[in-house]
Image (cartoon, helix red, strand yellow):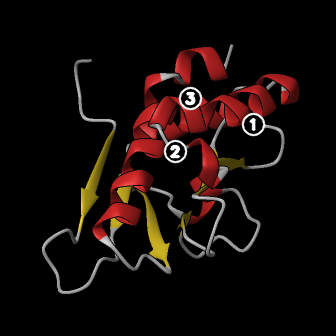
Amino acid sequence: MDKIIWQPTNLCIEGHDLKIILDREFANLMVSAKADQTKLQRFNEMLGDLIGRKSFNPHIQYYEDTALATTFSLGTGGIWLAVDDTNGRNPLEVYRNEPLSYSSHNVDSTSDRDILLRIVNKYIEYADIIRE
């Protein structure tokens, strides 16, 4: 890849919470793609194997019928990363001229944090397949 698509932040603060920022150009590409819901469901089913945590039931929620992820979830314990302050609106309309910002919820350990980061990374890695 020629550029940074996503970046974790707040990794050095006390506690285990984190934020990530997602490149706006990448987000625009994903929100422009009408996603095949069957493909998204299959990707979610494979996600546990891809990150090595099948028992957690990790999954991604998407904005409407697009390929843009709005929530990355461990599928257990209410642990997730979600795009901030959208309240159901298109994230690109909320973040008009800046990268999208996602914040964590209920991240109580470095293991939780690591798994969330792996979910985000797999989403980016498989983005071309997800949006086909």
Closer to us: mark 1 or mark 2? 2
Position of residue 67 in the picture relative to residue 100 (left or right): right
Q: What residue occupies the far bottom of the structure in this picture?
A: 14
Position of residue 37 in the picture relative to residue 6 (left or right): right
Which of pointers 1 and 2 lies earlier in the amino acid sequence? Answer: 2
The residue sitting at 63% across, 41% down in the picture is 68
Q: Position of residue 126 (x, y in %)?
A: 52, 22
Of 21 and 37, the residue lying toward us: 37
Residue 31 seen in the figure: yes
What is the quadrant of residue 9 in the picture? bottom left
User: Pointer 2: what residue?
Assistant: 53
- When the figure is inspected, residue 129 is found, relative to residue 57, above or below; the finding is above
Alpha carbon distance from label 3 to label 2:
28 Å
Closer to us: mark 1 or mark 3? 1
Residue 29: image tag: 3
User: Pointer 1: what residue?
Assistant: 66
